Image (cartoon, rainbow, N blue to C red):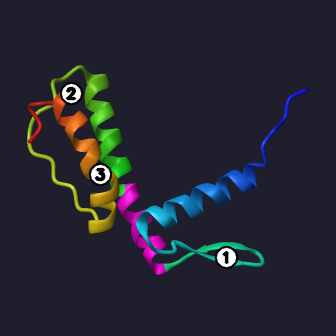
Amino acid sequence: MHCHRNPHATVARRVTSLETLLGRPLFDRRADGYALTAEGKAVLDEARSMDEAALSVLRRLDAGTELSGLVRLSVGRVLAERFLIERLGAFHKRYPAIG
C-alpha cells in the first residue's frame, strides 16, 4: 500500500521552514489562503531575478559558448548570507572565467 503525503501540509512546512531561515514572515495566513507580505513580495522579486539569471546561464550553456565575464547579483542581506554565499563557491569552481 502506498502512502501519499498531503501536498498542502508539505507546502506549509516548506513555507514555515523558509520563513524560519530568513527570520521573518513572508506570508499572512488567512482563512481563504496565504497572501504575500511586503517582505514576501521583495523576496519573490529577488527570486525572479535570480531565476532569470540562471536561465540565461543555461541558455548560454545550450549555445555551447564558454561562460566568462562579470556577473552582478542584487539580493537582500539575509538571502545572501543564509542562502547564496555558500553556493557561490561551487558556481565559481565550475565557471572560473566568471567574475
CA gap, disc 2 and disc 1: 40 Å
User: From what the image shows, is residue 60 above or below residue 74?
Assistant: above
- Is 46 within the magenta? yes
- Is 97 within the magenta? no
Q: Residue at x 28, y 59 (%)?
A: 80
- The image shows residue 47 at horizontal and vertical percentages of 39, 57
Quarter of the image that includes the N terminus:
top right
Quarter of the image that includes the C terminus:
top left
Residue position for label 2? 94
User: From what the image shows, is residue 60 above or below residue 28?
Assistant: above
On residue 84, which mark appears? 3
- The image shows residue 14 at horizontal and vertical percentages of 59, 55
Instruction: Report the amino acid beneath label 2.
Output: Arg
User: From what the image shows, is residue 35 above or below residue 58?
Assistant: below
Q: Residues within 10 Å of mark 3 (few under 14, many from 20)?
A: some
Which residues are the magenta region?
38-48
**Sequence order check, earlier mark of 2 and 3:** 3
CA gap, disc 2 and disc 3: 16 Å
On residue 83, which mark appears? none
Q: Residue at x 65, y 55 (%)?
A: 11
